[in-house]
Amino acid sequence: MKRRNFLFLLLTATIWGVAFVAQSVGMNYVGPFTFLFARSIVGGIVLLPVIAVLRTRSSGHAADTVQEKRRARRILFAGGVCCGASLCLASIFQQTGLVYTTVGKSGFLTACYILIVPLMSFLLFHRPCGAKVWFGVALALTGLYLLCMTGELGINRGDLLTFISAILFSVQILVVDYFSPRTDAVRMSCVQFFVCAAIAGAGMLLFEQPSLDALLTAWMPILYTGVLSSGVGYTLQIIGQKGMNPAVASLILSMESVISVIAGWLLLGQALSTRELFGCALMFAAIILAQLPNKTMQKAAQ
């Protein structure tokens, strides 16, 4: 089970990493609220037939009582709303921060959730992570620094907005960790996207001037991020996090930063320096270290 979860989360990080290219292209045509609204709508719609198929396959099982069904719907709705709201806010802060800061600094600050998640998990839920996880976090942060912090140092408005997004992404990971064992992952993911789309849609109407022509021009990045990054990626995240320590999950998901650099190299011709390659190697070492057997981690995961 743990190996399957690891593979699901690694695939999620790969999809998200490539999505940075699609997002950068899509932002040339539409605003952040419009882009997030469109991709979330696509992600939710993609999951509707999947839910229908799964419902058909489970129709032969024994029916739950009315009370159990009501309780399941309440948990599903609460999980979808909490995940969708945190996802939307985190994505908007990240995208808006990119207007005022560099891509490298944004990538480093966003991926700080690998440090924030275990800190939140320990402070709020008293969940220990173990020395290997903390050492893996230190390795990963060092790798991220070498990988992303290649421009000027200093804190500006964009850095602050991006760091807030990292906190919100940490909240989203912990919310998924709480609800994923308690409800259906695919259905909660679907609710999450429609909630995210509703919030982003309100922001789109208030702060932007969306047009059909712009959306049609950006159809390819919207389709990729909607179907794969949202519909597939966030669903795999919810499934993959079941029974896994959120600190370890955040380490695996942080591989999206490495994948994004590799995707930029392959798809956009952006060369990797020796410093960046070393940063990738440290990130990979941190992921492997976090997967090594550890009694403390196993107890925490339980």
Image (cartoon, helix red, strand yellow):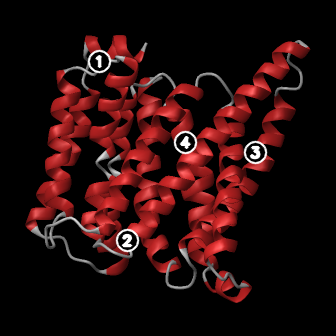
Examine the rendered structure and indicate whether residue 249 appears above or below residue 201. above
Element assignment for label 4: helix
Q: Which mark is residue 128?
A: 1
Element assignment for label 2: loop
Q: Which residue is found at the position 78% from the left and 35% from the top?
A: 54
Q: Considering the image in quadrants, where does the C terminus appear?
A: top left
Element assignment for label 3: helix
Asked whether residue 242 is in view, the answer is yes
Toward which corner of the image does residue 158 lie, by quadrant?
Answer: bottom left
Q: How far apart are marks 2 and 1 (CA)?
A: 34 Å
Q: Identify residue type, mark 4.
A: Leu
Q: How far apart are marks 4 and 3 (CA)?
A: 13 Å
Image coordinates of residue 253 in percent, x first then y, are 38, 44
Going from the N terminus, do you reach mark 2 or mark 4 first?
2
Q: Distance between the residues labelled 1 and 3?
A: 36 Å
Image coordinates of residue 169 in percent, x first then y, are 44, 46
Toward which corner of the image does residue 135 lie, by quadrant?
Answer: top left
Going from the N terminus, do you reach mark 1 or mark 3 first?
3
Q: Which residue is found at the position 70% from the left and 26% from the top?
A: 75
Q: How far apart are marks 2 and 4 (CA)?
A: 26 Å
Q: Identify residue type, mark 1.
A: Pro
* Residue under pointer 4: 236
Q: Residue 98 carries which label?
A: 2
Image coordinates of residue 128 in percent, x first then y, are 29, 18
Q: Which residue is found at the position 18% from the left and 70% from the top?
A: 272
Q: Residue 50 carries which label?
A: 3
Q: Identify residue type, mark 3.
A: Val
